[in-house]
Image (tube, rainbow, N blue to C red):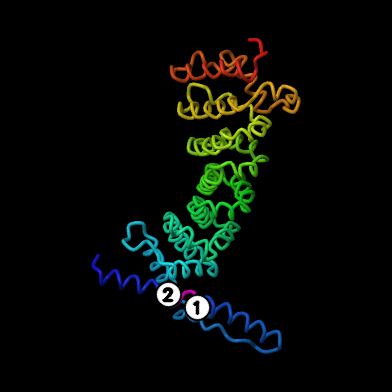
Amino acid sequence: MGYARKVGWVTAGLVIGAGACYCIYRLARGRKQNKEKMAEGGPGDVDDVGDCPGARARARARATRARRAVQKRASPNSDDTILSPQELQKVLCLVEMSEKPYILEAALIALGNNAAYAFNRDIIRDLGGLPIVAKILNTRDPIVKEKALIVLNNLSVNAENQRRLKIYMNQVCDDTITSRLNSSVQLAGLRLLTNMTVTNEYQHMLANSISDLFRLFSAGNEETKFQVLKLLLNLAENPAMTRELLRAQVPSSLGSLFNKKENKEIILKLLVVFENINDNFKWEENEPTQSQFIQGSLFFFLKQFQVCADKILGIESHHDFLVKVKVGKFMAKLAENMFPNSQE
């Protein structure tokens, strides 16, 4: 693409973007003035678009041009994907003021692409972009919601952004758990929560949702399982979360994951989660508090696992040699560290 054409596209994008913001502002202001006139007994202004087919067609054409301009700027294959602070401000204006899903989607894609660059994460935050994008989480449109989660996920790599985004963690977690199983929204939510728990600072905010995460892990497809495992692994690496993990209620179907049909990588990653929990558990410190763990908890699952994994889970007959070796070593670690008084 030649330089002149690039400049033309940039100019068109800025003009249409600014025009869209101004039109939205005029529309909102006009509606407010109409309401005030009608409250005073006046007839109010007549909507120019109204029943006129030509006006509606022109409005649709303008919307299409605006969408194409935003999408052009949002395209990952475009040479001018990186937006200036002024352009980012206009895109945020569209996100804040537009109610059209296709405009929101295109604008959020543009923000998500730009939030992938470290220098833009500070700019978007300083422009007030975090609460603007987070507000979109309340939408019922799954496509728009997914795009908003992707933007927040890219922004959450920044430590200061994480500090400000923590207030939305409970909402994101609840929405993720209750979203349609294996949906794009659910996966996007899991990725955001995984980024937010890379450090130990905000992991405690998910303490009450660990049982739900294990249920999601058991019920989900492979992609969902892998994403939940990444999140659980973050929690399991933190000694302060060990007791919360062991208290979590786990579905009885968790043991069936060790059968011959399950993906080997999923089994091995789950074992890493269990190994981290075991390594962080101090028998001498926790022996008096074992009464806090109830039947159905991860603590009792691991206790049963250590005693009879061969018989109940059929590990001995597993077709993969590496899985059998890893499980055998883990059982030995459990017997040595977590349940030294258990009898086989």
Q: Residues within 10 Å of mark 2 (few under 14, many from 20)?
A: some
The numbered disc on residue 264 is none
Label 2, secondary structure: give it: helix
Q: Picture coordinates of residue 23 (x, y %)? A: 50, 78
- What range is drawn magenta here? 15-21
Q: Residue at x 57, y 85 (%)?
A: 46
Kind of residue at badge 2: Arg
Q: Nearer the viewer, mark 1 or mark 2?
A: 1
In the shown orientation, is residue 125 left or right of residue 44? Answer: left
Q: Quadrant of residue 206?
A: top right
Label 1, secondary structure: give it: helix
Please state which of residues 244 and 264 is positioned toward the viewer in this rendering. 244
In the image, residue 197 sits, relative to residue 163, either above or below, namely above
Q: Which residue is mark 2?
A: 62
The numbered disc on residue 23 is 1
Q: Report, in whole angstroms, how far the alpha carbon at label 1 lies from the one at label 2.
A: 11 Å
Q: Are marks 1 and 2 in contact (CB under 8 Å)?
A: yes
- Seen as rendered, the residue at the extreme front is 284
Q: How many marks?
A: 2
- For the stretch drawn in magenta, the main secondary structure is helix
Which comes sooner in the sequence, label 1 or label 2? 1
> Which image quadrant: the C terminus?
top right
